[in-house]
Image (tube, helix red, strand yellow):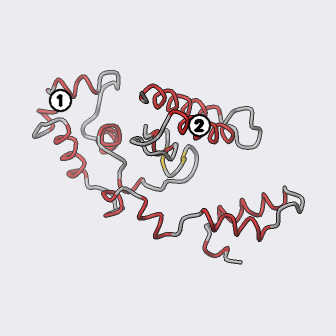
Amino acid sequence: MATKLLPAKVQKEIARLSEKSQNTITRDDLEKLVLLVYPSKSEQKSNHNIKLSISEKPLKLAEIKEAIYKRFDVKNTDELKKSGQFQMATDGLGKLNFNNKETWEMLYRKWIDILPDETNQEGYGCINGIDIFKYSRPWQVFNLDGKTATKEDVKKAFYQLSKIYHPDNQETGDRKIFERLNKMYDSLIAGIS
């Protein structure tokens, strides 16, 4: 079968599911199903925002700063610190250390976009390539289009994720992830008219 086309993580899950199904579903059938729905590398790249697919290399600090200056319509860090709009936006974040790249990256994540080298993330707290603890991108996490999704679409997407991350699920449940998904769900439902 064509398992070489699938990441090791997916192959492992196919093996686990086929063992768990007690011969009701064969491994070959699972692989065929996954290959039908799993996007190829070219499809994965074309599904990304063009801005992100241009470059996945890390942004330089100067590029991050410039994007933040532009967002808050200032020319430098001194103007940024004095900007009323920036002060309101960062109220509650505590004291910011503008000498740390991490501070600038956090500001970029919050008000600009996903950092190019942080796309397609995997691991704890990553859903649909988004680290839900670094980013508040509920449309991407729920894999929906914000312009066309209905409340019913949001509910369905939330239900699917809830089945996986609800704390009562003994295999894959996670309270922290579920609480974060709940907040995202509430914000999406509130925003749909």
Indicate the position of residue 33 as horizontal and vertical percent values: 69, 64
- Residue 158 is labelled as 2
Q: Percent from the top left, x then y, of residue 140?
A: 46, 45
Q: Residues within 10 Å of mark 2 (few under 14, many from 20)?
A: some
Q: In which quarter of the image is residue 49?
A: bottom left
* Quadrant containing the N terminus in the rendered view: bottom right
Residue at 65%, 37% in the rendered image: 162
Q: Residue furthest right?
A: 22
Q: Which amino acid does label 1 sit on?
A: Lys
Reply above or below: 27 against 60: below
Q: Residue at x 34, y 37 (%)?
A: 110
Residue positioned 54% across, 47% down in the render: 126
Earlier in the chain: of badge 1 and badge 2, it is 1
Q: Residue 193 carries which label?
A: none
**Residue placed under numbered mark 1 in the picture:** 81
CA distance separating discs 1 and 2: 38 Å
Which mark's residue is nearer the viewer, 1 or 2?
2
In the displayed structure image, the side of residue 89 where residue 154 appears, left or right: right
Q: Residue furthest bottom?
A: 1
Secondary structure category for the residue under label 2: helix
| SS state under label 1 | helix
Residue 163 is left or right of residue 151, and the answer is right
- Horizontal and vertical percent position of residue 34: 66, 64
- In the picture, measured across the screen, residue 162 lies left or right of residue 104, that is right
